[in-house]
Amino acid sequence: MLRRSIHLLFATLFFCGSVTGQLCGEEPFTSRAKVTNAALVYWQAFALLPEQSEEDTKLLNDLEKGSKQVVDARSLLTRSNTALSLISHLKPDTPCRWELIDNGPNTLLPHVSKARMLARLLILQARMDAESGKTEAAVDHLTQALLVARNVDEGVLVQMLVGDSIESLAADAAQSLLPRLGASSRGRFAEALSKLPTRTTFARAMSYERDVFARGVGPIMTVDRAALRQLGSDEDSPDVRAILAGTKRERTKWFEELLAEYSKLIEASKLPLPEANKEFERLESEVQDSPNPLIRLLMPSVGRANQKHAEVDARIAKLETTLRDANTSAGTSN
Amino acid sequence: MNDDKSESKPIEEELRVLRPRELSDGFIESLHKCLDRPVPHDDGPQPRRGGSFKLFAPLAAVAALILIAFGLVRNWPIREAPAPSKNKIASPAIESPDEQVDELPRPTLIAYNRAIGNEPGSLEELLDYHARTLLPNVPDPDLAYQEWP
C-alpha cells in the first residue's frame, strides 16, 4: 500500500511538473515584465548595434567633447533604432549579471566597449528628442543610459571609468534638458534616478582590483617562467624581462609588495578628495621609481580616475538635488 | 471486374488465415483470476474504482502545493547585488582570432588597466577599437522593428 502511494505521488508530481512547466517555466520567449537578467537583453542589443564607421565614432566622440551638433546623427540613430527599442523596457531593479569568467588579469571584458557605445547612442537619442520637443522620450533615454552605466559597473576599475564617462555625458545632456522640463517630467526624472542601482565607490573598485590580482597573479609568481608569460604579451618590455629573470623568492617578495601598494591605494581613496589627490600623486611617483618590476608593470595610475569619479559623484548628486528642489517648489506653488 | 474478383479471392483467404483466433471463455477467466479482478459481465454493474481516486486526490493536492511553493521561491523578485563571477579558469587565456590579425590588445583587464595608465585618451581609443571590431555589426540592422501592441 505504501509503495503504491509513493508511486502515485511521484506520478502526480511528474504530471503536475510537466503541466506547470508547459504553462510557466518553459515558454520560448520572456515577457517584458519578467526579464530576470538585464545582461542577456543588453547582449541582444549589442548584436543589433549598427556597424560603426570612422564618421560614427567621430560623431560620438564629438558628443563627448560637448558638441551641440546632433543633426548629423539621424542616420546613425535610425540604424540603432532596433537596439535602442529592445532595451527600452528594462527596469532599474532588474538584476544584471554579466557572468564574466574570472581569469585574473587576463579576464575578458568584451561587453564594456559595447555598453559604452549603446549608452552614448541613448544620450545622442535623448539630445535629438529634446531638440524635437519630445522631452518625455528624452528623460526615458537618459534614464536608460544611466542604467547602462550602473549596470556595466560591477566594481572593476575600467568598468567604473566607463560608467563615469557615460554618467558625465548624461549629466551634460540633462543639464541642457532641464529648462525644457515641466514639473511632472522633473518629478518623473527624479523618481527614475532614485530607483537606479547605487554607484560603486572608488575604494571598492580598488579593493576588487587587489583581489583580482591577488587571485590571478599570486599563484603564477612561484611557478615556472613559461607561466609567467601570462603577465603580458609584451615580453620585450624591461619590466616583464626583469620579472622573468627574478628568482622565485624575489618574485614572491615583489608580489607581497604589490598587494601592500594596493592597500595604500585603498586607504588613499577613503580620504577627502584634496588629501586623496595628494596621496595618489605621491604613490604614483613611488610606483614610477619603484625597484619592483611587478609594481611598475601592474599598478594602475588611478589619481586621474579618482578625481573624475569624485567629479561625477558631485554632478549626479547636484542633478538629483536640482530635480528634487524643482519638484518640491512646484508642489509648494501648486 | 471479374478479373479483379478472381485476383482478390486468394488474398482474402490469406488474410483469413492470418486473423487471430478468438480467445476461449476459459482462457479469459483464467487471465482475470491471474490479475485478481472479478470477471466483468455484460448484464451486471461494473465494480467501482472510488478507492484509487480517494487516494489520488490528496496526493495530487500535496504535489500541486509543493510545485506552487517551489515556483514562488524560484521566481521571488529578489534584487541580487551585482558581483563578478568567481568561476575560475585554470588554463591560460585562449588566443582569439583578432589577436592574430591586430596589434591592439584584446579586451582584458590588464590591457584596459595599462591603457588607463597611459596618456589621456588611450582608454577611449582602445574602447572605440573594441566597439568596432568585437562582435562586428551589420551595416544596416534596421529590421523595421515595431513593438507588438
Image (cartoon, coloured by chain):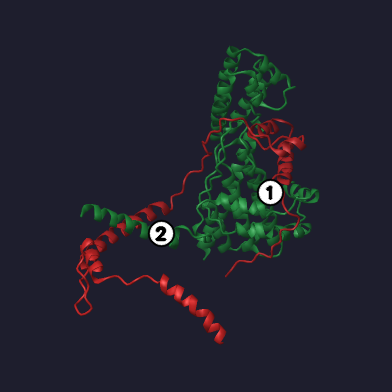
The correct choice, above or below, for B48 with respect to A55 in the image is below
Mark 2: give few (<14), some (14-19) or many (20+) Cα within 10 Å.
few
Q: Nearer the viewer, residue B148 or A166?
A: B148
For label 1, the residue is: A117
For this rendering, which residue is in front, A285 or B107?
B107
Q: Quadrant of residue A247?
A: top right
Q: Is residue B91 above or below residue A255?
A: below
Residue A175: % across, % down: 65, 53
Q: Which mark is residue A18?
A: 2
Chain letter of disc 2 in the image: A
**Which quadrant would the C terminus of chain B be assigned to in this image?**
bottom right
Q: Which chain is green?
A: A
Of the pair A129 and A281, the residue shown nearer to us: A129
**Dots 1, 2 in contact, CB < 8 A:** no
Location of residue B85 with respect to A260 vertically, above or below: below
Q: Can the viewer see residue A139 in this picture?
A: no
Q: Which lettered chain is shown in red?
A: B
**Residue A234: mark in rendering:** none
- Quadrant in the picture for residue A253: top right
